[in-house]
Image (cartoon, grey):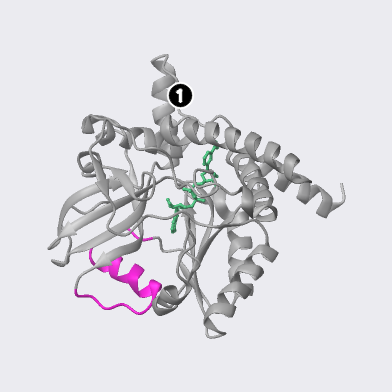
Amino acid sequence: MDKREAEETLKQLRSELDDYGYHYYVLDKPKVPDAEYDRLMKQLLEVEEAFPELKTDDSPSVRIGGPVASAFKKVTHAVPMMSLSNAFSADDLRQFDRRVRQAVGDDISYVCELKFDGLAVSLTYENGLLTRGATRGDGTIGEEITGNLRTVSSIPLRLREPVSIEVRGEAYMPKRSFESLNKAKEEAGEEKFANPRNAAAGSLRQLDPKIAAKRNLAMFAYSIGEVDGKALTTHYEGLQFLNEIGFKVSQEAQECASIEDVIAFTETWTEKRHDLPYEIDGIVIKVNNLAQHETLGFTAKSPRWATAYKFPAEEVLTVLREIELNV
Ligand code: NAD
């Protein structure tokens, strides 16, 4: 591909991805499956890597989330809420591991967590009291949705310890709630939600909290933005602390001593993902040691100490199985 072709390709990809992003993040109505969006994004990243002079600040490859809806009060996140880099294969994970080792050496362990398919939210507690809830928004500025988040029963209104802390988690709609919501919508002749993720996002971005209250949402806490007066050395300790102070934390999170253990975890959950009562779209892998997070730092869009392994799209999975079984 020469530079002129690259320019054309980038223009096309950026315009498609911007349009899909708008439908997904703003309207909560995706136009294409996630796997298609991911495929185009991968292509965009590859072309931008081959032609770095064609990178732009407004490319979907550097943007997090979508624009913030004006109907809500805007909040600025004290610590930005980043996106995650993606891995699509065991080899991508091994490459991630090599990059981590190059930066921090071989004394490394990981935490594997399920990647819940919902909406990232930030919860601020002052002396144990919930004072603010917000969406991730564009990573720097989010939408204030405290009233809606207060209706989610797994979100504590007061913590079991009077700590001042900013907690991050994924608000989601369990599969059963999603099915009954869509059934009710169908009976009422209303448009159905495409999937539980969009239903959760659509419910939390309503101006009237009574609607969110009826939607049976839940939240898994998965990280700490900042905390006063609590020294933590590992991410795993952070998860345990979140659980102690009253949050619902996934019991499936696992410490892994090597990248091969991480890969085994991703394989197990690729098989078992449909057994869960909520949707997941991958596995998040995080370096466990928090001092190593500092050393690794961030790119413009995501932390270098974490990555998201995305499950193969179901159609691709079927083809792979057929090849494996030689049918
Ligand atoms: P991402 O979804 O790949 O990863 C970041 C997010 O993962 C976090 O913000 C958080 O919400 C979530 N997460 C879930 N479990 C987590 C855990 N245990 N620990 C940490 N984070 C966890 O990145 P993104 O920027 O939110 O969105 C990009 C993705 O959204 C794409 O890969 C695509 O699949 C989807 N998307 C789809 C369309 C479409 O048209 N279908 C459009 C835009 C985006």
Tell me the SS state at disc 1: loop
Q: Is residue 8 above or below residue 152?
A: above
Which sits in the foreground, 22 or 15? 15
Quadrant of residue 243 within the rendered picture: bottom left
Name of the residue lying farthest toward the right: 326
Can you give x and y, in whole percent of width and height, for residue 112 in the image?
50, 66
Can you give x and y, in whole percent of width and height, for residue 270 in the image?
61, 55
Quadrant of residue 146 within the rendered picture: top left
Q: Which residue carries the number 1 mark?
A: 192
Q: Is residue 36 above or below residue 116?
A: above
Identify the amino acid type marked 1.
Lys
Quadrant of residue 232 within the rendered picture: bottom left
Q: Is residue 162 above or below residue 172?
A: below
Can you give x and y, in whole percent of width and height, for residue 277 in the image?
46, 47
Is residue 128 in view? Answer: yes
Can you give x and y, in whole percent of width and height, for residue 170 in the image?
38, 51
Q: Is residue 229 above or below residue 21?
A: below
Q: Residue at x 47, y 57 (%)?
A: 300
Mark 1 C-beta to ligand 1 under 8 Å: no
Q: Residue at x 59, y 79 (%)?
A: 102
The residue range painted magenta reads: 229-249
Which sits in the foreground, 297 or 38? 297
